[in-house]
Image (cartoon, rainbow, N blue to C red):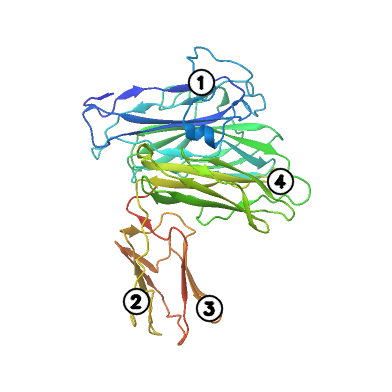
Amino acid sequence: MTIHGFPFVFLLLPIAIVYAFHFRGGTIARRPWNNSQTTGNVQLLVRQRYSWRRASFYCDDTTIDSGNLIANGANVFCASGAWLAALVVGGGGNWAVVCRINAIVRPDGYINSSLLATTLPAIYKAINQQHVHVIQMSDNDRTDTLKCRWATSSDNTNSYDECAGVCSGVPGAVLYTNNCTLVFTLPLNVYYTAVTVQIEDYYSSSSAMPMSFVPLVFLFYGYTTPSGCSAPPSIVGVRPNRSCVGTPIGSTATEYVIAQVGCNRKTIINFTFSSPIGMTKGTIQNPSTGVYQIVLSWIPVADQYGSQGFCAGAVDSTNVQSEQWCITFLAGFTSPDIIRSTVVHGSVSLLGTIFQSQTAISFQTTKSVGRPTRNGTYIHFTDPTSNTLVQSYGCGWAPEFTYAEITVVIRFSIAPWTIGHSYYVAFDSGVASGAEFCVM
């Protein structure tokens, strides 16, 4: 692949057109091996991910870890078969996953990397109820603006039919462009709806043309709510949904997916995943009543540098699925951590004694940090003497927080301290974002 002195050069148009009952969607993304090389031959790493019904070609963790082909390799010149009929729109028709790959040189002088979109391939939702679904996005180029749009058959920036027979596959759905949020209602029991979107990244919010295009095709499956209690399970893991986690290359990342059943006498029978290559999963554990967990382990390798998406869903004993829970691993980076200070008396440190009238407390981190881009991350101050929550601040928006490189300062309008009392300070995961973080 050669870059010329044009604003951008389109190099390749990979297209996956599928005529098969087992196909369940997919996505295509790419990034350069070296984003600062802007002349000569440039190597691109293209990431393609497709989903299928496992009964057609069985696969498990061992199959995936081996990296080998499933079934026999062959050159396929024409493909046809038992097309998926149980679709609200496009039943029995063909699908398309279309991505235009280009070697655009950004205004800042670097080769652009496309964004990464991650989702579960099939998401179960009750029919005749309004639902909200947020598509997980991340981008190695942290300042880019990301936008979603519906895939279309014509008049689009790819200049190609982007969705074939499953365009507008979710009748009446609304797609919010700036945060890739879907609002929809499923009309039919035991039928699928195909979601076909194109996600684009722009150099800035004022840019007229996108720099890359990433297709994403996945399914919603409609079901009738079971009789009695029908509350879905929920994932209540250590990390908030849509967290961004630094993971050095070659180090072991261990994560827990923890789920709580929504109804008494139900159990969690399965966890579904969309995960990076090489991630292994343990068996389902039941540490307490109504709580189930599974342990994940992953050692990222060099060609996985950058954003790697992960999504999970918990399925209970009546086949009701939880909301999708996603995090992004930032492979090749280390997350900032709080510096555990020594005991200091009469200071603003988190460890030591403070004055009753003191209204400022600070802590330092191992790397430069800023305010998190995601709400729902809190710092809590608790008085164990009276077992009361003294104060709780949302780090994503609270004006009481000041972030200055490696120092975070918290200012109270009124000092809440009682003479002779001790206080615990609890930090949610993600109270600060490092200089390298996922754009979501």
For marks 4 and 2 on the same chain, the one whose residue lies earlier in the sequence: 4
Give, as a three-letter code, the residue at label 4: Ser
Q: Is residue 437 visible?
A: yes
Q: Secondary structure at mark 1?
A: strand
Q: Circle 3 is placed at which residue position?
A: 384
Local packing at callout 4 (Cα closer than 10 Å; few below 14, some 14-19, many 20+) is: few
Give, as a three-letter code, the residue at label 1: Ile
Q: Secondary structure at mark 4?
A: loop
Q: CA distance from mark 3 to mark 4?
A: 39 Å
Q: Circle 4 is placed at which residue position?
A: 317
Q: Picture quarter containing residue 19?
A: top right
Q: Closer to us: mark 3 or mark 1? A: 3
Q: Is residue 357 above or below residue 330?
A: below
For marks 1 and 4 on the same chain, the one whose residue lies earlier in the sequence: 1
Q: Circle 2 is placed at which residue position?
A: 348
Q: Is residue 161 above or below residue 118?
A: above
Checking the image for residue 17, the label placed there is: 1
Residue shown at the point (48%, 22%) measured from the top left: 16
Residue shown at the point (49%, 51%) measured from the top left: 255
Residue furthest right in the image: 227
Q: Where in the figure is residue 429, as x and y percent of width and height?
A: 46, 59
Local packing at callout 1 (Cα closer than 10 Å; few below 14, some 14-19, many 20+) is: some
For marks 3 and 2 on the same chain, the one whose residue lies earlier in the sequence: 2
Q: Is residue 391 above or below residue 1?
A: below
Q: CA distance from mark 3 to mark 2?
A: 20 Å
Residue furthest top in the image: 77
